[in-house]
Image (spheres, rainbow, N blue to C red):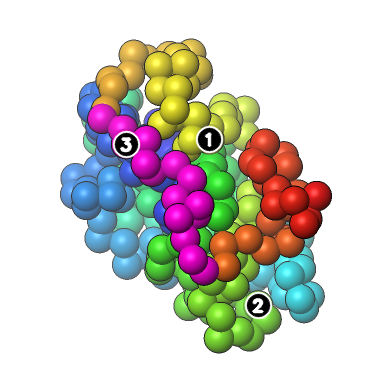
């Protein structure tokens, strides 16, 4: 079984469509973004998880409780309802994708320690250009500094999800893939994924203009707290921040 981890607007639809084109069952109902729908039980599961994340102020969250506590039965029931079409599918080659999986990633790894995890990464400067349901983390029970700045709110959501993933011990079957590499070097990137998954993967149409959209953006799309992650994944840092 396979799941995709990555914040909304990370380009995760590309890998979801690739998996579907390769014969991977991605659920009984999938929207144009490649998300397993309906999402309501997943959203509620995220809210159950969010109750147990402590906000220390500023951009600092304490995830220790979610890593140590027993996973609530309510959460398990909601997740199983959301994933019912995948979990009951008879074939082994199956999975799901929805960005909100990232919000509950620590408990996903504990419930499904042996599945394949694809962590899909995109330059955060591109990731925050468009609105996403996870922009306001309070909708999922996560506290953060109040702001009326829409881009800053998205950026905080990006950092929270990055920090949550980094706080979680990596499962045994884990791979990290940059969206930009998939677009610019699809064959090479798919070979990595094929080696990881142990299955041949189909090729989908990609659009080069999906990369570096921030360069044509007139708004603020960089925040200093992006820097550690951008350095880790080899994205260019603005000169003033170098």
- Residue at the outermost left position: 29
| Image quarter hosting the N terminus | top left
* Mark 1 or 3, closer to the camera: 3
240 w.r.t. 53: above or below? above
Dot 1 surroundings within 10 Å: few (below 14), some, or many (20 or more)?
some
* Mark 3 or 2, closer to the camera: 3
The image position of residue 200, as x and y in percent, is 34, 13
Which residue is the site of mark 3?
207
Q: Is residue 29 located in the magenta-colored stretch of the structure?
A: no
What is the C-alpha distance between the residues marked 2 and 1?
A: 27 Å
In this rendering, position of residue 84 left or right of residue 121: left
Query: Toward the viewer: 239 or 137?
Result: 239
Please tell me which of labels 3 and 2 falls first in the chain. Answer: 2
Dot 3 surroundings within 10 Å: few (below 14), some, or many (20 or more)?
few
Query: Toward the viewer: 169 or 186?
Result: 186
The image position of residue 76, as x and y in percent, is 46, 57
Which residue is the site of mark 1?
178
State the image quarter where residue 232 is shown. top right
In this rendering, position of residue 91 left or right of residue 155: left
Which residue is the site of mark 2?
144
Query: Toward the viewer: 79 or 190?
Result: 190
Look at the image and give the residue range highlighted in magenta: 205-219
Residue drawn at the location 75% of the way across and 51% of the way down: 239
165 w.r.t. 175: above or below? below
What is the C-alpha distance between the residues marked 3 and 2?
A: 35 Å
Pointer 3 with pointer 2, Cβ within 8 A? no
Circle 2: element type:
loop
State the image quarter where residue 87 is shown. top left
Q: Is residue 216 located in the magenta-colored stretch of the structure?
A: yes
The image position of residue 45, as x and y in percent, is 45, 65
- Camera sees residue 117: no
């Amino acid at each position: 079984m396979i799941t995709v981890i990555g914040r909304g607007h990370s380009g995760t639809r590309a890998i979801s469509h690739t998996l579907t084109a390769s014969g991977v069952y991605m659920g009984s109902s999938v929207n144009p973004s490649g998300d397993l729908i309906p999402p309501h039980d997943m959203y509620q599961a995220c809210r159950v998880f969010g109750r147990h994340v402590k906000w220390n102020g500023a951009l600092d969250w304490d995830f220790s409780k979610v890593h140590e506590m027993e996973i609530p039965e309510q959460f398990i029931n909601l997740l199983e309802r959301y994933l019912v079409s995948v979990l009951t599918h008879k074939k082994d080659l199956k999975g799901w994708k929805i960005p909100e999986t990232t919000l509950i990633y620590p408990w996903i790894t504990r419930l499904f320690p042996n599945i394949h995890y694809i962590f899909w990464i995109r330059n955060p400067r591109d990731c925050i250009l468009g609105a996403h349901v996870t922009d306001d983390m309070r909708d999922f029970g996560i506290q953060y500094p109040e702001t009326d700045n829409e881009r800053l709110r998205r950026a905080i959501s990006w950092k929270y999800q990055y920090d949550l993933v980094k706080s979680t011990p990596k499962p045994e079957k884990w791979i990290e893939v940059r969206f930009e590499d998939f677009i610019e070097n699809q064959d090479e990137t798919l070979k990595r994924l094929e080696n990881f998954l142990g299955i041949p993967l189909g090729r989908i149409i990609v659009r080069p203009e999906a990369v570096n959209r921030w360069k044509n953006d007139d708004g603020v799309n960089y925040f200093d707290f992006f820097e550690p992650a951008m350095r880790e994944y080899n994205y260019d840092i603005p000169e003033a921040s170098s």
